[in-house]
Image (cartoon, rainbow, N blue to C red):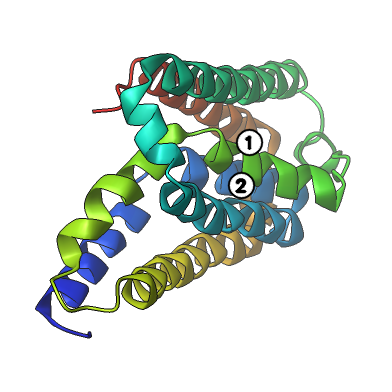
Amino acid sequence: MFDSLFWAFIVLAALLTISPGADTVLTLRNTLSGGTRDGLLTMAGICSGFVFQPLLATMGVAALFVKLPLAFAVVKIAGAIYLVFLGIRSLSEAIKLWRARNQSEEIAGTNQTRASGWKRYREGLLTNALNPKIAVFYFAVLPQFIKPGDPVLLKSMLMTFAHYIMGMIWLGGIAICAGRLRRILIRARVKAGLEGLSGLAMIGFGAKLALARAR
């Protein structure tokens, strides 16, 4: 079961995990906004999607997305709108911080209201759950790494679990590192720039998702 195909999937999953995407940007943004706790809760929500999406693929929902473009379009547009909403909110925060740039850096940078844990978790979860391309990915890619005679369910679960662990380590590491550098990164001018870049990135990812096709 732990054959060359399994390890090939591990390499592919690792490359996908470290590729910059909406999940990375959201984790970094929420860490800078509320600290390491907020970043780790965002990571937990995102990684919950790593379980949700393969489940959809197993249930055949991913196949439904492929066969019924309308179903795929509805979910992807919802996800795109959500990402754009998060992006606009980040841009709004950047503008607010930029207007306050003449204030004390410490006051402008640290005057933050910590979001509830559920809100951060929900943001991460919805970012993944409303991206039908992930379910289609699992539906289309996992079978290519399973050969005849393999225990299909067990091997699929192991590959999914490995991807889940990689996501936790990567995003958790980002949250912890950004949390330790937060005193520097939350200075008003720096944070305004980061919020602006995050907002533009989230809007860009939303536009990319809106233009995505099931196949």
Q: Which mark is residue 209?
A: none
Observer-nearest of 21 and 177: 21
Q: Residue furthest front?
A: 149
What number of labels is visible? 2
Q: Is residue 92 left or right of residue 63?
A: right
- Residue 125 figure quarter: top right
Q: Quadrant of the N terminus?
A: bottom left
Q: Residue at x 71, y 23 (%)?
A: 93
Q: Is residue 214 above or below residue 114?
A: above
Q: CA distance from mark 2 to mark 1?
A: 6 Å
Q: Is residue 24 above or below residue 207?
A: below
Observer-nearest of 83 and 58: 58
Q: Which mark is residue 185?
A: 2
Q: Is residue 159 visible?
A: yes
Q: Quadrant of the C terminus?
A: top left
The residue where tag 1 is placed is 191
The amino acid at mark 2 is Leu
Q: Is residue 21 visible?
A: no
User: Dots 2 and 1: beta carbons under 8 Å?
Assistant: yes
- Residue 84 figure quarter: top right
The amino acid at mark 1 is Lys
Q: Is residue 43 above or below residue 8?
A: above
Q: Position of residue 83 (x, y in %)?
A: 56, 25
Quick one: SS at disc 2? Answer: helix
Q: Position of residue 211 (x, y in %)?
A: 34, 15
Q: Badge 1: how crowded within 10 Å, few (<14), some, or many (20+)?
A: many
User: Upstream in the sequence, badge 2 or badge 1?
Assistant: 2
